[in-house]
Structure formats: structure tokens, C-alpha cells
Image (cartoon, rainbow, N blue to C red):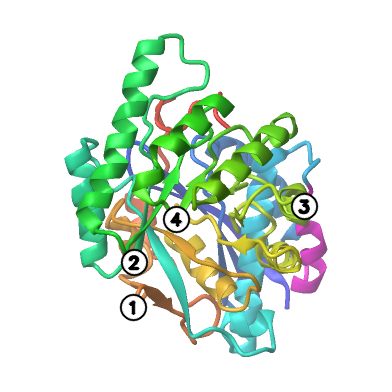
Amino acid sequence: MNIAQFEALILNVSEKTNWFFIRVTAENGMTGLGEASLNGWETAQLAVADNLRTAVQGKSLDAVMPLLRVYPHSPGGLVASSVASATEQAVTDLRAKLAGVPVHQLLSGKAARKAVPVYANINRGARDRSPAGIALAAGNAVAAGYTAVKIAPFDGVYPDHPDAAELKRLTRLGIERIYAIRAAVGPDIGIMVDCHWRFDEPGTLQLIHELQAAKLYWLECPVSENPDGFAAISRIHAETARSGMKLAGAERQVAAAGFKPFVADGLLDVVMPDIKYAGGYAEMLNIAALCAAHDTGFSPHNPSGPVCNMASIQLCAVAPAFLILEYQLAESPLYFDVVGGFRPKLVNGCFEVPDTPGIGIELDDAVLRAHPYRALAANANLDPRLG
């Protein structure tokens, strides 16, 4: 079966968010979906997609797959990797539909999990950034059935902040948000804290000390994950272990080769590969196998749109070393509108794994047309100093 059409589709969600999808259509009219959302880089992604369209249209599904490999050393970086990863997802979705099976069955002949544990990322849905507002968002998530929540509470904190007093105030406010969540949800709900690489090593060690009483499940991405930061990450990992919390990260790495230092060298307890960037299903399974071989948790990064979410659910149904899946909660009703109202079923803190062919959803073109791409403000997403 050949690819008759390759489309890059962008949905504007808010002043902070666009979702970027790839759709491939076979000669028989069947379609497959993937997601490549990378806020602020959409025009560059479109250029990559234009080149890839020329390479894949008219070719068979089998012939296309070798063209979609990703590499940590690629000169196209995360932009090119995201488009290739989304296309790999889309081709895999299409292949599963052609076979009449869910993606997880196509990926593995072994028995799949019927449900996958999930935690609620409340960060973008919590528009009231006061400690009380954050606590309310966390409480609402727990009331909806989630047994763990994540927040990125350190707005405005940077490792090279020029004003020491202001840095201390912003850090303290972030800590107050975390303790407000703990007070709101009680002792049994897991709390994950995403630092978005906002600290240096001394700041992180102090933060771990101040958060001990909050009983975090994990601390995520406290410092830069470039190779020159690996020694600091190792020391931070030792301190989180002493403090009874996990250390998580590596969401921007690509392919199993990019994750190997974090896993094989024991830098992290949990790695968070993203199917949008890391190489699609095939490379995500390679990363999961690496995690299984080194007793490291595999917890996919998934804070974006509904296609990534459904692809990640299918992946997590069969991935070894799987721990828990991220879910972006309450950012926008477009999350459901753009897939015809479909909502993943949450039972006992887990998403049920669909058994319909492919990933189980299609895009609503009318919704896409009603919310076209919009350029985001320069300050809409993370500062380029972070990461």
C-alpha cells in the first residue's frame, strides 16, 4: 500500500499553544495520525514537512519507514526529529488500521496491558497561579479520579537570574505552591514537580532540602541535561535518593542512543521520552528495553495534544519498564473537539487501552479549519536559556 497524501496540520489552542499533526492517507483512503507539537517552531517544522512530503508521497509504507529514523547528532535537531517521529506514528497508525488491529497489537504479539496508570499535569490548566489556585486545580484533578498530579511551579526562576532577592522570592512562591497542593490532596496522592531546568546545582540541593516534608514522588529536570551537567545530575540523584524522592528527566533526548547516558550510567530513576520527538513507536520501544535492562522507570512525556496521548497509551500498553503516563489536564476543550468528542476512559487512576483499529481517533477537519495556526508570542513558552 502506498502513501497517496501527506499533510501537516496545525491547530491553534491558545495564546500559548499550537498542536502540530501529521496525517498520511493511503491509496484506499485510510488515514494514519501522528503528533509533532513543538511550540514556537511550527514554521520550521512546516519546512521540514515539505521536504519529507516529497520523499514519502507515492512510496509504500514499508519503503517509507527507513526514512523516518532519528539520530541525536542530526543537524535538524528536535525540529526535524519531531516531524520524522510524527510521520512514523502516522504510518504505524495506518498500518494497524489496514491490519484491522489496535497499534499495541501491531507493535507486540504479547498480551498488552488493559489499562495504563496516568498522572494529571495540571500546569497549563491552572490559570490562577496563586498557591490557592494551584491547590484548587490539584484538588479538582483528584476529584476527577487522578491519583497523582504534576505542577511546574517555579515561574520566572532562572539559574542566572540577575536579582538575588527576586530569585529567592520566586523560588519561595514555587515552594508554597507545592505545599499548598500537598495540603489540598492529602498524603496519599503522588506529586511530581517539574523544574524545567531552572536551577543550578546548589539551588537544587537547597530545594530538595526544603521539599522533603512535601513527600514528592519525583523531582523533574532541575538542572541542564547537557553533558557538562552530568556530574551535577549524579550528585543531585544521590541527594534525591537520600531524601526519598525519585529524580526524573531527559524529555528532550532523541533515540535510544540519546538516553543511554542517563540510563546506563544511572543518572536518573525515571526517564521521560516523548513519542513526538524520540523517534515514534519503534525508538520508544528501544528506549523502554534499555530502561528494562538497567532497572530505570519508563514514563513517557505527554503534555500536549490528543494524538500524542492516544499514541502514548498504545505504546504504554506494551512497553517494558513502564511506570506511569503523563496527561495534560484541562488546557482546552479543543482537546476533545478536534477528535470528535472522544475522551479516554479513566478508571482507578488508569486510562483504559482502546481495542479499536489504529490509535482509535480521527481528526475533525472542521475544528482544524476553525482554529488555524497562529504565531505565538516570544514569551509564550520556555525561555531558550532553559534546558
Which of disc 2 and disc 3 is earlier in sequence? 2
What kind of residue is marked 4? Tyr
Rendered image: mark on residue 260: 3
Task: Write down the quadrant of residue 7 in the picture.
Answer: bottom right
Residue on which disc 4 sits: 217
Residue on which disc 1 sits: 348
In front: mark 4 or mark 3? 4
Horizontal side, residue 238 vs residue 170: left or right: right
Write the residue at 69% across / 83% down.
108
In front: mark 1 or mark 4? 4
Residue 52 image offset from top left, x and y in percent: 72, 51
- Mark-to-mark CA distance, 2 and 1: 8 Å
Which of disc 1 and disc 3 is earlier in sequence? 3
Whether the magenta-drawn stretch holds residue 367 is answered as no
Residue 365 image offset from top left, x and y in percent: 40, 62
Label 2 crowd bin: few (<14), some (14–19), many (20+), radius 10 Å: many
Rendered image: mark on residue 147: 2
Q: Nearer the viewer, residue 25 or 240?
A: 240
Q: Secondary structure at mark 4?
A: loop
Which SS type dominates the magenta stretch?
A: helix
